[in-house]
Image: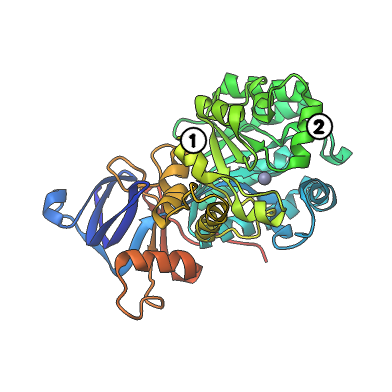
């Protein structure tokens, strides 16, 4: 049945322009957008019952292209370390707790509730090495009705013994998750997730590549985040031309849809390889700043035609709110601009597009309100911020910079309104 919503509708069809329909209408059928228009007649919906959201903003929901669900307890702490000591001292000890599914359930319910609050309806998520708690996380996303690609982490070296899994156990764990969750059109699916090259032996990486090929599953990992990490990868994978090539040699770099977090130091041949293999960058500006990793050259990526989305990367990043990631992405691009005026900084429209249509493309037709797109949407009451007749574009900008979760009144994923997920206190 067709549903029609009325509100101030804003979305980005192209990265340089925000489409605006003041008090416009959007028609949705079977979870997908049929059309957007200034009037009911041209939508062919004159008979339809209209849900009127008054003066609210209606925008596409957020897509978080990179986060670690088991690091929710570490959000906002231990940010005085760089990547490698931070992993050893904080991340790995916390992830070990996810052998206990009761602990995992308490924490995973929290992270899903937080994502819901901030209007993130789709995500690419790292779980831990544990199959049982990864399964639980997938069940909880299903229960919530929110879309997620969830990766059981593959890891067997340079980590505590408790987190090292044999290649055979990793493979069996994946196959049980694939058997249970991998269905056409599933909202929650597995994604092959080698933690990063230093955490996986060649055999582990090869097996990950074989799983991705056999089951046609997407791949996620980390790439060129930090100089020390890149040097470590060079010493481990001597035949690889660069870090990206190390993944590529194992079938983990665009052989199936692939998203790589960070890419702070990606350039030259690595950048060309990403472009050639259609690998998406998950740009995680807060994480890159917190861990002193650097500033990813997003303007270059966009100009070169690379696919880019935004990621919160908790707990390297401290924020799950993707609207803040839009702001940080713009600010980081302005620091690049300071150093080189040929690198123009990101506009609001471009950064908003990264968080919606550009990132969303990893999940299919997600992140826009063009016909055929899945209706993932947020209804925002910004009246607190709109005390002096701002234009709709300025209202969107103020919400991005100043808004918070209390102003999101409704959240939709694939056309369904998503109620607040339950937590265990
Ligand atoms: Zn990460």
Q: Position of residue 311 (x, y in %)?
A: 57, 49
- For disc 1, the marked residue is 306
Q: For residue 357, what is the image quadrant?
A: top left
Give the mark, 2 or 1, whose residue is nearer the N terminus: 2
Question: Quick one: which residue is furthest to the bottom in this view?
Answer: 387
Rendered view: 146 above or below 279:
below
| Residue ID at (78%, 50%) | 91
Question: Quick one: which residue is furthest to the right in this view?
Answer: 161
| Residue ID at (38%, 70%) | 381
Q: For residue 130, what is the image quadrant?
A: top right
- Regarding ligand 1, which quadrant of the image does it lie in? top right
Pick the front one: 57 or 325: 325
Tell me, for residue 349, which label it has, or none.
none
Q: Quadrant of the C terminus?
A: bottom right
Instruction: Decide if residue 260 is on the left or right side of residue 400.
Output: right
Secondary structure under badge 2? loop
- For disc 2, the marked residue is 156
Name the colouring of the figure: rainbow
Q: Residues within 10 Å of mark 1 (few under 14, many from 20)?
A: some
Q: Residues within 10 Å of mark 2 (few under 14, many from 20)?
A: many
Pick the front one: 339 or 281: 339
Q: Which mark lies nearer to you, 2 or 1? A: 1
Rendered view: 369 above or below 243:
below
| Residue ID at (72%, 59%) | 73
């Amino acid at each position: 049945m067709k549903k029609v919503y009325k509100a101030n509708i804003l979305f980005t069809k192209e990265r340089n322009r925000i489409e605006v329909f003041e008090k416009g209408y959007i028609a949705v059928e079977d979870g997908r957008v049929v059309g957007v228009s200034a009037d009911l007649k041209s939508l062919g919906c004159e008979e339809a019952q209209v849900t009127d959201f008054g003066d609210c903003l209606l925008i596409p929901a957020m897509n978080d292209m990179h986060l670690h669900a088991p690091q929710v307890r570490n959000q906002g702490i231990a940010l005085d370390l760089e990547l490698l000591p931070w992993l050893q001292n904080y991340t790995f000890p916390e992830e070990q707790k996810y052998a206990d599914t009761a602990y995992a359930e308490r924490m995973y319910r929290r992270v899903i509730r937080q994502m819901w609050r901030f209007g993130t309806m789709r995500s690419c998520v790292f779980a831990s090495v544990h199959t049982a708690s990864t399964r639980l996380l997938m069940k909880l996303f299903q229960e919530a009705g929110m879309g997620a690609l969830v990766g059981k982490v593959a890891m067997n070296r340079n980590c505590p013994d408790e987190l090292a899994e044999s290649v055979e156990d990793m493979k069996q764990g994946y196959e049980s998750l694939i058997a249970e969750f991998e269905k056409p059109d599933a909202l929650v699916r597995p994604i092959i997730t080698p933690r990063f090259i230093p955490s996986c032996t060649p055999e582990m990486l090869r097996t990950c590549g074989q799983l991705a090929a056999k089951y046609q599953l997407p791949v996620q990992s980390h790439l060129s985040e930090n100089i020390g990490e890149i040097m470590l990868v060079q010493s481990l994978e001597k035949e690889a031309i660069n870090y990206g090539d190390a993944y590529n040699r194992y079938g983990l770099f665009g052989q199936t849809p692939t998203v790589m977090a960070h890419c702070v130091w990606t350039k030259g041949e690595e950048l060309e390889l990403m472009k050639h293999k259609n690998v998406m960058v998950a740009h995680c500006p807060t994480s890159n700043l917190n861990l002193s990793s650097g500033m990813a050259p997003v303007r270059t990526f966009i100009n070169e035609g690379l696919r880019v989305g935004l990621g919160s990367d908790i707990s390297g990043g401290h924020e799950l709110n993707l609207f803040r990631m839009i702001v940080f992405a713009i600010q980081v691009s302005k620091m690049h601009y300071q150093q080189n005026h040929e690198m123009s900084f990101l506009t609001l429209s471009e950064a908003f597009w990264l968080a919606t249509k550009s990132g969303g493309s990893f999940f299919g037709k997600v992140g826009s309100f063009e016909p055929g797109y899945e209706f993932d949407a947020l209804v925002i009451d910004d009246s607190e911020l709109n005390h002096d007749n701002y234009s709709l574009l300025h209202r969107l900008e103020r919400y991005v910079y100043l808004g918070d979760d209390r102003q999101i009144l409704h959240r939709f994923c694939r056309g369904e309104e998503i109620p607040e997920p339950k937590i265990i206190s």
